[in-house]
Image: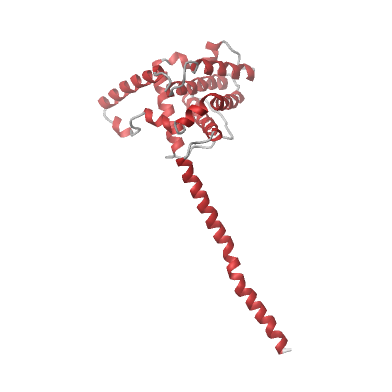
Amino acid sequence: MGRAAAPATGQRQGQQAGAAPFARVPAMEVLRRSSVLAAEIMDAFDRSPTDKELVAQAKALGREFVHARLLRAGLAWSAPERAALVPGGRLAEVCAVLLRLGDELELIRPSVYRNVARQLHISLQSEPVVTDAFLAVAGHIFSAGITWGKVVSLYAVAAGLAVDCVRQAQPAMVHALVDCLGEFVRKTLATWLRRRGGWTDVLKCVVSTDPGLRSHWLVAALCRACRLLRAALFMLLPER
C-alpha cells in the first residue's frame, strides 16, 4: 500500500509543479492587454481621428459649452450623460479655447447670441421646430465655407438656444440640440476636422492660455483688444 501511495503523491507534486506556469498565464495576459491598450492610446495621437470619434467629441464639447453658458445665466440643467472633461486633458483644453473664443464673439455682437428663439420667431414647444431652425442657421453659417470662427459661432448659437429652452421650461430640448449639433458635425464638418487632425487644431487660434500673463491691468487691456481683433478676423477668414 505504501508503494501505491507514492505515485499518487508524486503525481500531485507533479501537478502542483506543473501548475505554476499556468498560474502565471493570467498575469501575463493582463500585461499583454495593458501593453496593447497603451499602444492603442499612443496610436490615437499619431493618427487622424475617425468620424465617430469627432462626433462624440463634438457632442461632449457641446454639452460643456452649453453647461457653461447656462451656469453663467444662473440656470440649472441636468445632463446624465455629461461626464466632466479630464482637467488638463486635450479635450478640456479645446473646450476652454472654444469658450474663450465664444466670449470674444459675444463681446463683438452680443445681440446675435441672446434671445435666439425670438430672433428666429420659433416656438420652443416642438422639438422638430427647434432642431430644424438650428440646422437652418448652421447651414447658413457655413454656406460660404468653414473656419474656426464659424465653428465657434455654431456653438454659441446652440448655447443661446439652449438658454432659451431652459428659461421656458424645456430642458429636454437641450439634449436634442446637442444631438443635432453632433449630427451636423458628422455631415458637414467631419471631413474638414479630420484634415486638420481633429479638434485640437483650434488650439492654434490662441497664443497662450496662461492667466498669469494678464495679471497687470495694462497687459490685460492689450490682450483683450488683440483677442477682439483676432475674433473678428476669424469670422472674416475665407475657407482654408
Estimate the x, y position of residue 189 in percent, counting from the top left.
51, 25
Q: Quadrant of residue 9?
A: bottom right
Q: How is the image coloured?
A: secondary structure
Q: Quadrant of residue 225?
A: top left
Residue at figure coordinates x 59%, y 12% from the top left? 122
**Looking at the figure, which quarter contains the N terminus?**
bottom right
Estimate the x, y position of residue 44 in percent, counting from the top left.
48, 41
Estimate the x, y position of residue 196 in percent, counting from the top left.
44, 31
Left or right of residue 86, residue 167 in this image: right
Q: In the rendered view, tell whether residue 9 sits above or below residue 42.
A: below
Q: Quadrant of residue 177?
A: top right
Residue at figure coordinates x 48%, y 27% from the top left? 192
- Relative depth, front residue between 73 and 117: 117
Estimate the x, y position of residue 175 in percent, counting from the top left.
59, 27
**Looking at the figure, which quarter contains the C terminus?**
top left
Outermost residue to the right = 1
Q: In the rendered view, tell whether residue 123 sits above or below residue 78.
A: above
How many tags in the picture? 0
- Relative depth, front residue between 96 and 3: 3
- Relative depth, front residue between 65 and 229: 229
Residue at figure coordinates x 46%, y 14% from the top left? 112
